[in-house]
Image (tube, helix red, strand yellow):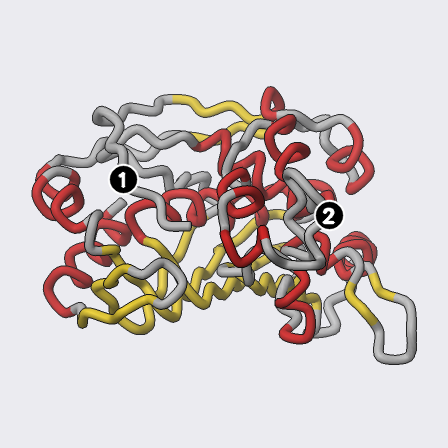
């Protein structure tokens, strides 16, 4: 929480106003932020200065691991976060690659699990990573990437948190996640949960102890219509102690994640929070 609140205050104190073409809004922006999460000691980075709908964040990362490309599939799993991008983005609605209602196109996990090869076919990046880590292998390239510049026109949104690099030291698994752009009042609340959960669950299914997760944000910003709520409401609140995340120990393989895992397999204990804040969402 302190890292999160410090970043929010830094943006307010040091940020520069930047016009955002996609949304038509101004953003108060800083460049480069580094957050760390102690997954090994179970310090779950859940925002407490407002109610966090953490289950939707967990559902979204599971959807990425499954390679979802439909807002309907994300909704069934437990998150509506792709509804607007799939169905309300004018540029995507006019895109010839869009297949119809709820189609997100070639995005995030769909890219990672079907990454095109120059000589034809594709490679499943996640399956390779899980195979290597399960066998104690770290080739210093255990990288799950959602970023494919040659395919941006085939999806409704470029990936924001686009790279997850796993590293194995002895029996401890580490994660470095990189995010090109972050809507701090709305998105970071989700992203912190997702980085933590990604390391925790990959460590669990590959048989390793989780260590630290390192979260790099390149462009961190607060939209102009979010600023008052952040400065005058959320930052005035005192945070509560961090809660604890419990993951079903029966989740033991990538196949489990793909086939039967639901939000019921993730439980938060000791979550105290202030009331929700409805920040505007920019499509």
- What percent of the width, then of the height, locates residue 274? 21, 26
Residue 11 seen by the camera: yes
Against 160, residue 38 (above or below) is: above
Q: Residue at x 67, y 28 (%)?
A: 249
Considering every residue shown, the one lying at the far bottom of the view is 119
Q: Earlier in the sequence, mark 1 or mark 2?
A: 2
Q: CA distance from mark 1 to mark 2?
A: 30 Å
The N terminus lies in quadrant: top left
Tell us which disc is closer to us: 1 or 2: 2
- Left or right: residue 104 versus residue 120 is left
Res 99 label: 2
- What percent of the width, then of the height, locates residue 37? 42, 51
Crowd band around label 2 with a 10 angstrom C-alpha radius: few (<14), some (14–19), many (20+): few
Against 57, residue 226 (above or below) is: below
- Left or right: residue 135 versus residue 222 is right
Element marked by disc 1:
loop
Residue 203 seen by the camera: no
Which residue in the protein does label 1 denote?
Answer: 279
Considering every residue shown, the one lying at the far front of the view is 94
Res 212 label: none
- What percent of the width, then of the height, locates residue 29? 25, 67
- Name the foreground residue: 114 vs 3: 114
């Amino acid at each position: 929480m302190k890292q999160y609140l410090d970043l929010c205050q830094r943006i307010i104190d040091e940020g520069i106003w930047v016009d955002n073409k996609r949304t038509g809004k101004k953003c108060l922006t800083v460049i480069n932020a580094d957050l760390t999460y102690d997954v090994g000691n179970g310090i779950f980075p859940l925002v407490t200065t407002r109610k966090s709908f953490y289950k939707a964040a967990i559902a979204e990362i599971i959807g990425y691991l499954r390679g979802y490309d439909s807002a309907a599939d994300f909704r069934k799993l437990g998150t509506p976060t792709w509804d607007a991008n799939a169905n309300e983005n004018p540029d995507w609605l006019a895109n010839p690659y869009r297949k119809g209602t709820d189609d997100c196109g070639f995005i995030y996990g769909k890219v990672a699990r079907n990454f095109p090869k120059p000589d034809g076919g594709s490679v499943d990046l996640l399956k390779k990573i899980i195979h290597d880590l399960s066998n104690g292998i770290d080739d210093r390239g255990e990288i799950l990437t959602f970023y494919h510049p040659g395919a941006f026109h085939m999806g409704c949104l470029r990936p924001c948190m686009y790279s997850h690099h796993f590293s194995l030291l002895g029996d401890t698994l580490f994660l470095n996640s990189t995010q090109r752009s972050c809507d701090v009042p709305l998105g970071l609340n989700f992203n912190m949960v997702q980085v933590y959960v990604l390391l925790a669950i990959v460590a669990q299914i590959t048989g390793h102890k989780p260590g630290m997760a390192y979260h790099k944000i390149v462009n961190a910003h607060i939209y102009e219509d979010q600023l008052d709520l952040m400065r005058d409401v959320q930052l005035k609140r005192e945070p509560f102690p961090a809660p604890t995340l419990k993951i079903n120990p029966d989740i033991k393989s990538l196949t489990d994640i793909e086939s039967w895992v639901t939000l019921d397999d993730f439980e938060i204990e000791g979550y105290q929070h202030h009331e929700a804040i409805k920040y505007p969402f920019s499509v």
